[in-house]
Image (cartoon, rainbow, N blue to C red):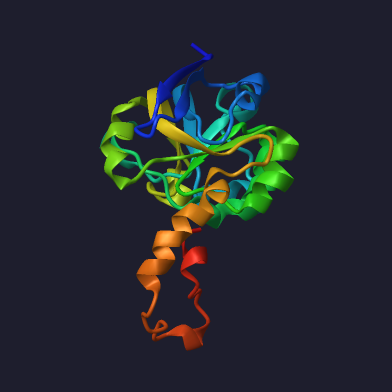
Amino acid sequence: MKGGDEASAPDGTAIREFHLTVPVSEADVRQLRVGDVVYLSGPIFTARDGVYNHMLGQGHEPPIDIRNECNVTTQSSPAGAEVAPGQFEVASLQATAGFRYASWMEPLLSRYGVRAVIGKGGMPEETYQTVFKKYGAVCLSTMGYGLGAIYGRAVKRVRAVYWKEELGISEAMWVLETERLGPLLVEGDAEGNSFFGQHAAELDEPLMAAYEGLPKPLLSRLGEESDPRRELI
């Protein structure tokens, strides 16, 4: 099913829910709006520092047809193991912080036609406005560490693990066959909107109150970010 079903949040707000099959089409993606909830079925591939640098930085061509067969990626290092030579199992799947990889999005989307990127916590709004909107893609966010086992149960089979020798098992490219992977929040849509950006003020208000009166971080002299509103990113 590719249409949207409506459910309600505890406050009565309507939530649209979509069940999409990978590879997702441009039409699939462009119907999504920030705040929608998505479930995915089909093959997805993992990519973090190792894969991005190996594939996009060093120019090694991917071992799969990303554009036509597997155009959804997750910024994950699966909690998995090689249970027999060439056979792998995944127990848990949790994405890492997406903002770390914003600089890789332009070459990833332009060269390989990725339509959906699964991360944690989203990316800078500028990345959505200049890259995701240009190429018709969305950023999907996982919903907290506690769902890692649930996401893991959606992995029905590990098709293959590529570049294991070059990058190590945790940074390798895992190709996972999924069924109803979710819930995933549409954090950045193909119109360049950000869910967290739209709701930052209401999130910041109680956060700033909690920080009020606290001393500045001891190591602020080293130049780390000390504004709690920016720490959310």
Q: Quadrant of residue 41?
A: top left
Question: How many dots with numbers?
Answer: 0
Q: Which one is nearer the viewer's eye here, 80 or 34?
A: 34
Image point (43%, 47%), residue name = 165
Residue 209 against residue 17 in the figure, above or below: below
Image point (46%, 68%), residue name = 228
Image point (61%, 26%), residue name = 29
Relative image position of residue 95 (x, y in whole percent): 41, 45
Relative image position of residue 89 (x, y in whole percent): 29, 32
Residue, far front? 12
Relative to 155, is 29 on the left or the right? Answer: right
Relative image position of residue 83 (x, y in whole percent): 24, 34
Image point (64%, 39%), residue name = 61
Q: Is residue 5 visible?
A: yes
Q: Which one is nearer the viewer's eye here, 71 or 172?
A: 71
Q: Which one is nearer the viewer's eye here, 152 or 167?
A: 152
Q: Which one is nearer the viewer's eye here, 196 or 122?
A: 196
Relative to 118, is 178 on the left or the right? Answer: left
Relative image position of residue 195 (x, y in whole percent): 54, 43
Residue 30 against residue 128 in the figure, above or below: above
Q: Is residue 89 visible?
A: no
Relative to 197, is 154 on the left or the right? Answer: left
Residue, far bottom? 221
